[in-house]
């Protein structure tokens, strides 16, 4: 009987080519992440990436290592691992430990990865990924107009054709930058992430003006606590709304569906793993909501895990699985992005090689 033999956490640090800025004052200068390593009773190994974000989840690199060693490992070791459902049951037990989103999410993904290796199954087949290609988008940092334009130009040359632009510090200036981006790259798509910074009385006007420019979506325009205001905004603006921070968990998603606050869900496998992300995907499909997939500023490993999940039939929007382009790391194993798309077969092959090189 296949069982979990070991679970451990290994801190890593990956430099960025330039810092990522968002919201009013948040900044990410390097990826201080944690590799979660699972070993099964037959020797099969699974590895996934935990992405601490103190200002989002309250986790740090040290807290992830501690929660894995003191709570998750004792809970997971010895558990039977024979199917996707077994991993989902382990994840349900991990949810008895509150918060610690990415520590639990990465553990879930590592368990699935180990099970794939034990059974000789690709992750794509295991997850039910059937799309041959994944459409990618790219997160653009806030900054001066020339910095934003340079960031988009570099990503466009790398094959990206959909971009998420951060707004909320100076909307008038940011709008002019977006206007220039749309003029420069008519073949690209642009959407915005306000990171909850817009004022309730201004949000609909701002989003409608951006929509008229050609911006296609907005993520989290208003503060999370104003759920009625967020529901009202969806009825007041023509631009589709993306839920991200408002739907950290499956319970959060059910609340947002009840209030009908969004049009598109941004599922981040880094915080919900594959098990809960699958449940969220089903809930959105049943409710008629669109889905995109994010990687929570992951390195190549986390981006590939997210991209393969995004190859499922229900994911129709461009997915944010290209953050590895921002890292100052060895990307020799990274698959090629062609005119906005990533091949599922190449993503799976790259992931297999990356896992092998990490064991």
Image (cartoon, rainbow, N blue to C red):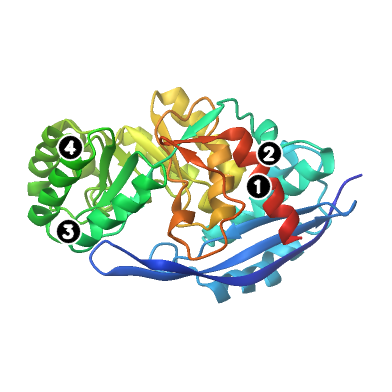
Q: Which mark is residue 351?
A: 1
Quarter of the image where one finds residue 126: top right
Q: In the image, what residue occupies the spot 47% across and 30% down?
A: 315
First in sequence: mark 2 or mark 1? 2
- In depth, the one of 111 and 17 nearer the eye is 17
Q: Secondary structure at mark 2?
A: helix
Nearer mark to the viewer, of 4 and 3: 3
Residue 232 numbered tag: 4
Estimate the x, y position of residue 214 in percent, counting from the top left. Answer: 17, 34
The front one of 115 and 123 is 123
Mark 3: few/some/many CA within 10 Å (<14, 14-19, 20+): some
Quickly name the residue at label 2: 123
- How packed mark 2 is, by other alpha carbons closer than 10 Å (few <14, some 14-19, many 20 or more), is many
Q: Nearer the N terminus, badge 3 or badge 1?
A: 3
Q: Nearer the viewer, mark 4 or mark 2?
A: 2
Rendered residue at 27%/32% (across/down): 187
Quadrant of the image containing the C terminus: bottom right
Marks 3 and 1 sit apart, C-alpha to C-alpha, by 35 Å
Q: Is 91 rendered above or below residue 308?
A: below
For marks 4 and 2, the one nearer the N-term is 2
CA–CA distance in space, label 1 to label 4: 42 Å
């Amino acid at each position: 009987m296949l069982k979990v033999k070991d679970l451990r956490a290994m801190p890593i640090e990956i430099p960025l080519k330039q810092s990522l800025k968002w919201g009013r004052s948040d900044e990410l200068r390097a990826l201080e992440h944690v590799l979660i390593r699972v070993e099964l009773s037959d020797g099969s190994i699974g590895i996934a990436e935990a992405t601490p974000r103190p200002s989002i989840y309250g986790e740090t690199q040290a807290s992830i290592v501690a929660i894995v060693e003191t709570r998750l490992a004792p809970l997971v070791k010895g558990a039977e691992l024979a199917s996707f459902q077994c991993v989902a049951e382990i994840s349900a037990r991990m949810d008895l430990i509150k918060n610690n989103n990415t520590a639990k999410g990465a553990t879930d993904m590592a368990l699935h990865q180990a099970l794939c290796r034990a059974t000789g199954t690709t992750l794509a087949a295991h997850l039910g990924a059937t799309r041959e290609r994944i459409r990618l988008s790219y997160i653009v940092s806030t900054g001066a107009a020339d910095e934003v334009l340079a960031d988009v130009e570099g990503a466009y040359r790398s094959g990206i054709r959909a971009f998420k632009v951060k707004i909320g510090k100076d909307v008038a200036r940011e709008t002019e930058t977006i206007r220039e981006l749309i003029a420069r790259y008519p073949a690209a798509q642009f959407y915005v992430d306000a990171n909850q910074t817009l004022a309730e009385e201004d949000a609909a006007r701002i989003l409608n003006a951006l929509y008229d420019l050609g911006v296609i979506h907005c993520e989290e325009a208003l503060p999370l606590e104003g759920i009625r205001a967020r529901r009202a905004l969806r009825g007041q603006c023509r631009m589709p709304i993306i839920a991200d921070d408002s739907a950290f968990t499956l319970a959060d998603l059910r609340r947002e569906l009840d209030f009908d606050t969004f049009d598109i869900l941004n599922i981040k496998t880094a915080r919900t793993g594959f098990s809960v992300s699958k449940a969220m995907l089903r809930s959105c499909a049943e409710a008629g909501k669109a889905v995109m997939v994010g990687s929570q500023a992951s390195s190549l490993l986390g981006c590939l895990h997210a991209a393969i999940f995004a190859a499922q039939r229900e994911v129709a929007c461009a997915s944010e699985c290209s953050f590895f382009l921002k890292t100052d790391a060895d990307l020799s194993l990274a698959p090629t992005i062609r005119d906005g798309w990533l091949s599922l077969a190449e993503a799976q092959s790259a992931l297999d090689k990356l896992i092998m090189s990490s064991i």
